[in-house]
Amino acid sequence: QIERQYPTIMAVGTSSSMLGGAFLLLVLSSATDVHGGPSSSAAPRSPLDYLCNNLGPAYVGANLCVSTLCIDPSCRSTRGLPGLAVIATRLTVSNATVAKASIEHALAHAKDDKARKAMRSCLQLYTGAIPRLQWAARSAAAGRYSGVPEVLLAARYVSDKCTNLAGEGALPKENVEFFMMAFVAEAVVEGVQLFIG
């Protein structure tokens, strides 16, 4: 039963200033399921379903959470919430690496001097971000979450800054995809921190 794996949570927000109260949580009752019947009759939910359904639709919706984490096929078989933090941070590193490579490819074929200058600046941002994201992934794998959400938040700003430098639509789509990955990963790590204490 899910109640045996995870404690009942009766919170409507989080103390994290980054979430700003948007991290809305469902009240989980150990007595009844969503249909009002005894919880013993409800099928247990996987860690993935539990986490993604409790991040709060005002922050990261369940569908976005599941579709993003399940880029890694092990998303549904991972045992426990910490495994989802590992998947999220590992995928963020991969996305950053792919985004950087895509921008390098675009730079090699760019003709406009202004666009080339913006891409070079963007590449510097990614070059600085990737080692920090690798640290975040190692920390999550070791069960240490302090500082990890902050690294993921800073990584989102890399994508934003690149867009501002180069202009909307001037960079490969992988830059935006990286932003979304870092956004979801930040929420996942925050959620795992909150749920496991």
Image (tube, helix red, strand yellow):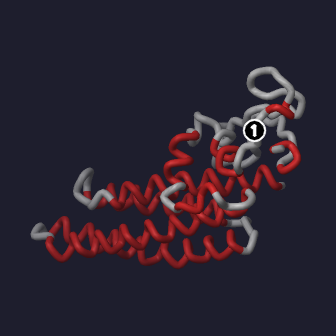
Taking the spot 18% from the left edge, 77% from the top edge, the residue there is: 108
Residue 134 vertical placement versus 19 (above, below): below
Q: Residue furthest top?
A: 36
Q: Residue furthest left?
A: 111
Q: Is residue 23 visible?
A: yes
In the rendered image, the vertical position of residue 183 relative to residue 127, given as above or below: above
* Occupied quadrant, residue 79: bottom right
What residue sits right under mark 1 in the picture?
43
Rendered-image quadrant of the N terminus: top right
> Who is closer to the viewer here, 162 or 29?
29
Task: Locate residue 111: give its quadrant.
Answer: bottom left
Does residue 23 sit above or below 131 in this rendering? above
Left or right: 119 with respect to 13?
Answer: left
Residue 20 appearing in the image: no
Residue at 62% in and 71% down? 136
Q: Is residue 158 shown left or right of residue 75? A: left
Q: How many marks?
A: 1
Where residue 38 appears, x then y in whole percent?
Answer: 86, 27
Q: Quadrant of the C terminus?
A: bottom right
Residue 163: percent from left, percent from top: 33, 56
Picture coordinates of residue 182 (x, y %)? 51, 58
Q: Is residue 15 left or right of residue 67?
A: right
Type of the residue with mark 1: Ala
